[in-house]
Amino acid sequence: MPITTAFKTEIPRISILDEHGNFDEKLGKGLIPDADLIKLYEAMFTCRRLDDVAFRLQRSGRMGTYPQNMGQEATSLGAAYALDKKDWLVTCYRENCGLFWRGVPMEAILLHWMGDERGNAMPREHYATPIAVPIGTQMLHATGLAWAAKYRGEKQIACTFFGDGATSEGDFHEAANFAANLDIPVVFVCQNNFWAISVPGRIQCSAPTVAQRGIAYGMPCMQVDGNDIFATVYAMREAIERARTEGKPTFIEMVTYRLADHTTADDASRYRDKAEVDMWRARDPMIRVRKHMEKLKLWDDKKEAALLERAEKLIGEAVARAENIAAPHSADFFNSMYLELPPDLALQRDTMQTHSLGQDPSQLANTDHLNRVTEQAH
Ligand SMILES: Cc1ncc(C[n+]2csc(CCOP(=O)(O)OP(=O)(O)O)c2C)c(N)n1
Ligand SMILES: [Mg+2]
C-alpha cells in the first residue's frame, strides 16, 4: 500500500497594522470605526499609566507584588472590544486593559495586588472572573461557564486568556479536549510572550507554533500578531462568530511580548537580552496605533497631553479609593468565593483555623492534650 497523507493543515497568521505602519486595507477597512480606535488607544494609554503607578506603589511598599501589563495591552483589549458585554472574560493576571474596557473598576485590580480579597470580588455585571494566579485553572473555569450557558440555551460564550507556559499544564489539555469534544463555545486565547518567567518558549513547546496545540483537539486555530489591535479584533470576531453560531471553540495564539519584568519580584535582565527587548519595544502595540491615528489626522500632541491629564486624574482617584477603603474583615477572603460557602470552609471562617496548618477546627474545644504536649516540651 502506498503511504498517503492522513492529515494536512495550515494555520493562518493574521496581521493588519504592523510596526512599520503598513495597514492591510482589505482586512482592516471598516473593522474598527475611527471613534472606537481613539477609545481603544486611550484605554491602552491609561492602562500603561496605571502600570507605571502600580510599579511605584509596589516599590514604595504600598502594594505586595504587581505584574506589569506593558506590551501586552492589545491582546485582551481586542478581545474585550469584540466580545459581547455578557460574554465571560476569564483572565489570568495581565489582562487589565480588557478588564477595564469591560468596566471593571481600577481599584479592584489595585486592591487585588495590595492583598485585599475584595479586589477579587468582580462586580457581577461585568461578567469577569477573579484574576487567576494559579497557572491554568481559568481555562477549565471558562469551559465550565460556557458549558453552563450552552446547557441553559443562552447565547453567551466564554473567552479565556493564558500564557505560553500555561499550555504545558494538564488543565489546558483537559479544558481544550472537553471544549472541542462537547462543542462548547469557548475562545482560548494564548498570549505567547515567549517566556514563562525565565523559561524560554522554545523549551516549553517544541512545535513551530503554539497555535497547533489546538489542532490536536480538533479546534480551528489561528496565529495573530497580538501587538496589532486590528488583528486581535479580526481574529476574535471570527472565533466569536463560530462560537455563537456553531457552538464550537477556537484556539488563537496571540504573539506578543511583556516589555517589563514578569512581576515586581523578578529581574528579567538576568535571563533576557537587551537586544531582544529593544526589538519588541519597536513592536509596541500602543505606538503603532498612535502613529496610524496621526497619519489619519485623528491624533496629535495636544490630544495626547489632554489624555495624560485625564488618565493621571482617573488613576489618582482610583489609588486614593483603594488606599482609603476601610480595613477588610478577615472573613472577606471566604465571602467572595462561593455563593453558598461549603460547611468546612464556613467552619474555617468562623474559627479562623485551618486543617492545612495541622489544626483541626472540629477539635477546637479539646485543647487540653495540646496544652499537655506543650508543657511536656518545656
Ligand atoms: C500552578 C502554578 N505553578 C506555578 C506558578 C508560578 N508561576 C507564576 S507565573 C508562571 C509562568 C507562567 O508563564 P506563562 O503561562 O507563559 O504566562 P506569562 O506570565 O508569561 O503570561 C509560573 C510558573 C503558578 N502561579 N501556578
Ligand atoms: Mg509567557
Image (spheres, rainbow, N blue to C red):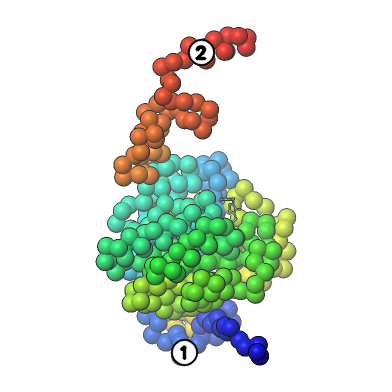
Tell me, yes or no, whether the two marked residues, 2 and 1, touch with CB atoms within 8 Å. no
How many tags in the picture? 2
Marker disc for residue 258: none
106 versus 230 height, above or below? above
| Quadrant of the frame with the N terminus | bottom right
Query: Could you say where residue 60 lies in the image, as x and y percent from the top left?
Result: 56, 43
Q: Amino acid at mark 2?
A: His
Query: Could you say where residue 254 lies in the image, as x and y percent from the top left?
Result: 53, 71
Q: Is residue 7 visible?
A: yes
326 versus 212 height, above or below? above
In-front residue for pair 298/2: 2
Q: Is residue 304 visible?
A: no
Image-quadrant location for residue 255: bottom right
In-front residue for pair 2/26: 2
Q: Residues within 10 Å of mark 1 (few under 14, many from 20)?
A: few
327 versus 361 height, above or below? below
In-front residue for pair 24/133: 133
Q: Amino acid at mark 1?
A: Glu
> From the viewer's perspective, is 229 left or right of 195?
left
Q: Secondary structure at mark 2?
A: helix
Q: Secondary structure at mark 1?
A: helix
Beta carbon of the mark 1 residue lies under 8 A of ligand 1: no
> From the viewer's perspective, is 44 left or right of 276?
left
> From the viewer's perspective, is 146 left or right of 10?
left
Residue farthest along the front direction in this orientation: 1
Query: Could you say where residue 122 lies in the image, as x and y percent from the top left?
Result: 36, 51
Q: Nearer the viewer, mark 2 or mark 1?
A: 2
Query: Could you say where residue 132 lies in the image, as x and y percent from the top left?
Result: 48, 52
Image-quadrant location for residue 167: bottom right
**Residue designated by label 1:** 25
**Residue designated by label 2:** 369
